[in-house]
Image: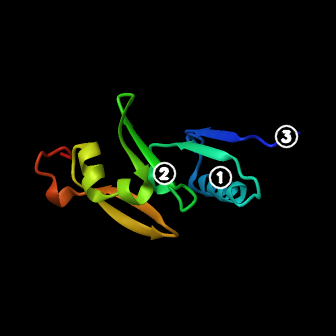
């Protein structure tokens, strides 16, 4: 059987518990290490699933691209606060992973109340 050129993970972690999600992310890392690794598209609503293996990020809002580029340029407090229309903080989880947290201290519009 031929190896695919493209794999699409569309909300692949939806409904998975934390351990199953981590197992999925490890499998993706394993695939990325293959000699002829396919291009992978990973669709998610959870920034903490964006691992070191993901190099580019595309943000969609209402089906329209609002930002795209290298993840280091896109996953910033400024861009994500604009995207969510509310202040956020980024917490480094190590291994080049982030957790996006609503910044309650700076919630001037009371989006979280």
Q: Under tag 3, what secondary structure? A: loop
In space, the residues marked 2 and 1 are separated at their CA atoms by 19 Å
Q: Earlier in the sequence, mark 2 or mark 3?
A: 3
Where is the N terminus found, in terms of image quarters?
top right
- Residue extending farthest to the top is 63
Instruction: Report the residue at 55% width, 39% height from top.
Output: 11
Instruction: Name the foreground residue: 93 vs 82.
Output: 82
Residue under circle 2? 56
Q: Earlier in the sequence, mark 2 or mark 1?
A: 1
Task: Please indicate whether residue 54 sits to the left or right of residue 90 in the image.
Answer: right
Q: In the rendered view, does 8 fall on the left or right side of 73?
A: right
Q: CA distance from mark 2 to mark 3?
A: 26 Å
Q: Give whichever of discs 3 and 1 has the lower sequence position.
A: 3
| Tag 2–tag 3 contact (CB < 8 Å) | no
State the image quarter where residue 104 is shown: bottom left
Q: Choose between 9 and 36: the one closer to the eye.
A: 36
């Amino acid at each position: 059987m031929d190896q695919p050129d493209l794999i699409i993970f569309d909300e692949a972690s939806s409904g998975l518990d934390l351990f199953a999600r981590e197992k999925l992310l490890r499998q993706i890392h394993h695939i990325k290490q293959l000699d002829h690794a396919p291009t992978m598209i990973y669709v998610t609503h959870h920034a903490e699933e964006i691992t070191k293996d993901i190099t580019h990020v595309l943000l969609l809002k209402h089906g329209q691209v609002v930002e795209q580029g290298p993840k280091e340029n896109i996953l910033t407090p400024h861009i994500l606060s604009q995207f969510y229309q509310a202040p956020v903080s980024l917490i480094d989880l190590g291994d080049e992973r982030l957790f996006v947290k609503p910044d309650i201290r700076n919630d001037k519009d009371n989006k979280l109340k």
